[in-house]
Image: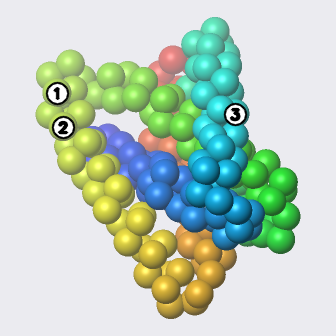
Amino acid sequence: MCNGMGLALLYFLLVMGLYGIAFWMPQIVHDLDRGSYAATGLLTAIPYGVAALGMVRVGMHSDRQGERRRHLLACTLLGAAGFAATWLFSASLAGSLAALSCAALGVLSALALFWALPTAMLSRRAAAGGIALINSVGNLGGYVSPASLGGLKEATGQMASGLLLLAGTLGLAALLGLRLTHGLVAKHGR
């Protein structure tokens, strides 16, 4: 698989996780809390706050180490575990919020780390076209994720299958990220 298409697929998988959070986290929280929409909005801010603080730390650590591969792997796996744990803790608002915070931290940090890869992996000549390809294919995940989760929720009446789909998607992103960055790591000695 060429680097441009591989990166586009990786971005597609990460965007699926992002849109899973953006579109469905309020619904998950509201289903658990059964409170007002204002309360849902405030509770939904918790995972985003955790992610905002955490992704700065992850980015700083990655920059300080000069390493992207292990950080990307850890973040995608954290996102996958967060989505799976949200399903496991679906009876507990506090547990679900903690799990959704892990999912948000993992997905948003992985996306931030991702954008260091195209310029490191693509030649100068291929970078502009490659980044356009990555965005074009990758952003289709913004359509596929909400539609898939909505279809699964409608078919099953619950979010469990959608959460597991997101966990699997990010697990696949972790594997693909490892495969794509293997040469990059060897080339830079990390």
As drawn, 157 above or below 174 = below
User: Hey, what amino acid is under mark 1?
Assistant: Ala
User: Hey, what amino acid is under mark 2?
Assistant: Ala
Q: Picture coordinates of residue 133 (x, y %)?
A: 20, 43
Q: Picture coordinates of residue 109 (x, y %)?
A: 57, 33
Local secondary structure at mark 1: helix
Q: Quadrant of the C terminus?
A: top right
Identify the residue at horizontal 20%, vertical 19% (top origin).
Answer: 124
Task: Answer whether labels 3 and 2 touch (C-beta < 8 Å).
Answer: no
Task: Answer whether labels 2 and 1 touch (C-beta < 8 Å).
Answer: yes
- Residue holding disc 3: 50
Residue 168 is drawn in which quadrant?
A: bottom right
Identify the residue at horizontal 71%, vertical 68% (top origin).
Answer: 34
As drawn, 157 above or below 111 = below
Q: CA distance from mark 2 to mark 1?
A: 6 Å
Left or right: residue 73 compared with residue 91: left
Q: CA distance from mark 3 to mark 2?
A: 31 Å
- Residue holding disc 2: 132
Residue 128's tag is 1
Q: Picture coordinates of residue 18 (x, y %)?
A: 48, 49
Local secondary structure at mark 2: helix
Extreme residue in the top direction: 64
Q: CA distance from mark 3 to mark 1?
A: 33 Å
User: Hey, what amino acid is under mark 3?
Assistant: Val
Local secondary structure at mark 3: helix
